[in-house]
Image: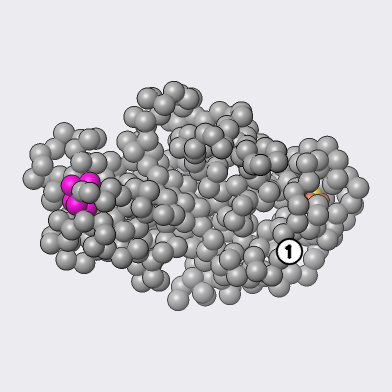
Amino acid sequence: MSKQSPVDGRGNTPLLEVSNLRTEITTKNEPVRAVDSVSFSVGRGEIVCIVGESGSGKSVTCESITRIIPQPPASIRSGTVSFDGTPLSTEENALRSIRGDQIAHIFQNPQQSLDPVYTVGEQIIEAIQMHRDVSRREARAESVTLLREVGIANATARIDDYPHQFSGGMKQRIAIAIALASDPALLIADEPTTAVDVTVQARLLELFDRLSKGGMSILLVTHNLRVVAALADRVLVMYGGTIVERGPTAELFDEPAHPYTQDLFESYGSIDDRRTTRARREIPTAGCRFQNECPFVVPECTSGAQPAFVPVTTDSNHMVSCVYYGGSYESNPIRNTDRTTDTQQTEQSTEQ
Ligand code: SF4
């Protein structure tokens, strides 16, 4: 069953606040707006999922938060990031102490987190001792526990193995263990379950749910809408480098408002499945970014900036960036579209 949303961080001050983030990527021809006008928050103990196709700006957003994105070719042009009520410094030394301590990243490719010349145990123990004053014996015992939690069998023996002695899926789980070793307040996880089988995926999702209930905030990028439905408190839908819809998970799944979200949710499986059926169009530089694919486009959509966010219903944090929800249209052909979405179908799939 879909998780009910506590909306905006369970009533607390958000742990993470991102405002008007804009990151460009330099290409051979011209800079590309990889991320533009992106604003959102993550509450304490909240799981926020970012969904959208490859190239929609999800990973660039995550990597811009703590500035781990390589500059160049990227360039963070504007925007502010506040963590625990304090603006994050843009100085590398200050950021380095935050990264891996209070904010941990899990990447799609676990190789980014693993050093091939040290055993996995040495790497987890180092991460624990870097952040906490515990003996090596205690750190080793904790490392074994962490490896068990992420589903590594025979952890007591395997702690002394090197990364190359593990499969790709196991490496990803070890990378997650290293990320958790510092007990971060915020975990930023970019497609963390892509390389693992469904059994391990279920175990990791259980772990994320348990961590969030224990107070850890999680910003999760995933293509798997069933994962989103089961785990997220809130959802951000990205298209063309910007957020086009956001809201509590149950409301967004019950009534996806943006034509792009509706299109995405029709598959109710993996966004990868859906992507194969959609033609990629150029992202326009003015007006709504979805205009070249939108069956409801009107002249108002083609000029100015991306439409402002407006509430989908009057008493909701469910917001959409689309002219039809702004009140100037008597009828809304998007809302009235007879969609084939079926929340029950999703919930059943999730429970399997
Ligand atoms: S603003 Fe216009 S082009 Fe964009 S999603 Fe809404 S109707 Fe479609």
- Residue at numbered disc 1: 279
Visible in this render: residue 269?
A: yes
Q: Position of residue 241 (x, y in %)?
A: 65, 45
The residue at the point 84 percent across, 58 percent down is: 296
Q: Main secondary structure of the magenta part?
A: helix
Which is more toward the observer, 220 or 234?
A: 220
The magenta stretch spans which residues?
119-124
The residue under the point 47% across, 47% down is: 219
Does residue 112 appear to the left or right of 246 in the view shown? left
Magenta stretch encompasses residue 122: yes
Q: Which corner quadrant of the image does residue 72 belong to?
A: top right
Q: How is the image coloured?
A: one colour
Vertical side of 134 occupied by 284: above or below: below
Rendering coords of residue 260 (x, y %): 71, 58
User: Residue 193 vs residue 285: left or right?
Assistant: left
- Does residue 77 belong to the magenta stretch? no
- Residue 2 in view in this figure: no
Residue 9 location in percent, x, y? 49, 42
> Measured from the top left, where is residue 310 in percent x and y?
73, 43
Please tell me which residue is depicted at 26% across the width and 59% down the height of the picture.
Answer: 164
Q: Is residue 126 left or right of residue 204?
A: left
- Residue sitting at x 65%, y 69%: 276
Q: Check disc 1 and give the amino acid type.
A: Ala
Which residue sits furthest front? Answer: 28
Image quadrant in which the C terminus is located: bottom left
Mark 1 neighbour class, 10 Å CA radius: few under 14, some 14 to 19, many 20 or more: few
Question: Looking at the image, is 277 positioned above or below residue 164?
Answer: below
Is ligand 1 closer than 8 angstroms to the Cβ of mark 1? Answer: no
